[in-house]
Amino acid sequence: MPDKYNNLKVISNLIRKRIVETSANSKIPHLGSCLSCVDILVYLYWKELRIDPDFSEDPDRDRFILSKGHASPAWIQVLAERGFFPITKLLEFGKDGSIFHEHPPIPGYIPGIEAATGSLGHGFPMALGMAISHKVQAKNTRCYALLSDGECNEGTIWEAAMLAGSKKVSHLTAIIDFNKWQATGRSKEIMAIDPLADKWIAFGWHAQEIDGHNFDEISKSLLSAKLEKDRPSVIIAHTIKGKGVSFMEDDNNWHYRIPNADELQAALEELESYS
Ligand SMILES: Cc1ncc(C[n+]2csc(CCOP(=O)(O)OP(=O)(O)O)c2C)c(N)n1
């Protein structure tokens, strides 16, 4: 039986290859952080968000904010492949004077970028601000934010969570890329956030836990979030840092490391073999 999500898998694989290549060629870190959220980004941009790459400023578009802004090399690859700007523009990535760099991504210069993120804890409150503004204007839009688990150590995340729950901002969906690592170690050893779902529920949210690499689970959880009419929704997506390249998976050295020529070749060969 053909796999319903085969097309998305092919796109994810392509994006992963480009992320690894750009990291090696332009010396861009946060490879593990980018690879863990590719499947979520691909599902959002190909199946979920009401957006038009040819009309990226449409006032009625859905909003997506990458709150874990250090993964913007992944976001930029997704926007390019989705048609927000020509993929050839990315040849400038990381070069002097280029608008494409590690982070923050620049709204107003890069089509599709909604906010300059990278200082953890700030993108999600911006998404909430947009969602509240749309609620006041009675717009029929949804706002989405992608957070990381280490980012949930930031107080601003919980201030925003409390406000969204209290104001019943039901057209806001937060997705947490729960890859269990931060920059320098295991999240649970630095500052444990478990039980994570219970915390959000206590703040008035609808909470779900999924496998963040399974398109069927991503799809169902986003649909279920949309059916919530009286409270915001959080999707805790269990993911693998470095997903897709066996020697990067769950190895936090790849938070900062840049692949050398042999590692680049091995990563591309492995990703190629899935295509
Ligand atoms: C406010 C703030 N402090 C520190 C950093 C530096 N920093 C970049 S990534 C990172 C760790 C992120 O870990 P996590 O949020 O779990 O994301 P992951 O890379 O594991 O996806 C840190 C501390 C930052 N970007 N913002």
Image (spheres, helix red, strand yellow):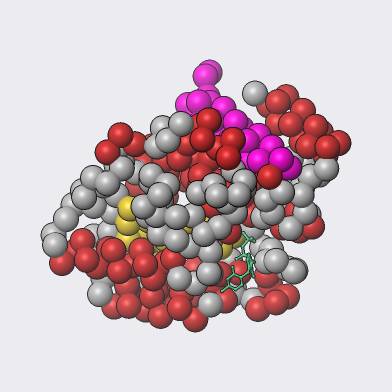
The verdict on residue 106 being magenta is no
Residue that sits furthest to the top in the current view = 1
- In the rendered image, residue 71, in percent from the top left (x then y), is placed at 57, 54
Image quadrant assignment for residue 149: bottom right
Asked if residue 40 can be seen in this view, the reply is no
Give the mark count.
0
Residue at 59%, 54% (x, y): give it.
102
Residue at 30 percent of width and 69 percent of height? 129
Q: Is residue 127 above or below residue 6?
A: below
Residue nearest the viewer, comparing 187 with 112:
112
Left or right of 189: which side holds 178? Answer: left
The location of residue 213, given as percent across then percent down, is: 58, 44
Question: Is 4 part of what is drawn in magenta?
Answer: yes
Q: Is residue 265 visible?
A: yes
Give the image location of residue 41, x and y in percent.
Answer: 49, 45
Main SS of residues in magenta: helix
- Residue sitting at the far front: 97
Question: At x 38% / y 75%, what residue is drawn?
Answer: 160
* Quadrant that contains the C terminus: top right
Q: In this rendering, is residue 123 above or below 204? A: above
Q: Is residue 234 left or right of residue 100?
A: left
Q: Residue at x 46, y 74 (%)?
A: 157
Q: Quadrant of ligand 1?
A: bottom right
State left or right for residue 250 relative to residue 198: right
Q: Position of residue 176 (x, y in %)?
A: 51, 60
What are the residue bounds of the magenta stretch?
1-25
In the image, residue 240 sits, relative to residue 275, either above or below, namely: below
Q: Nearer the viewer, residue 92 or 163?
A: 92
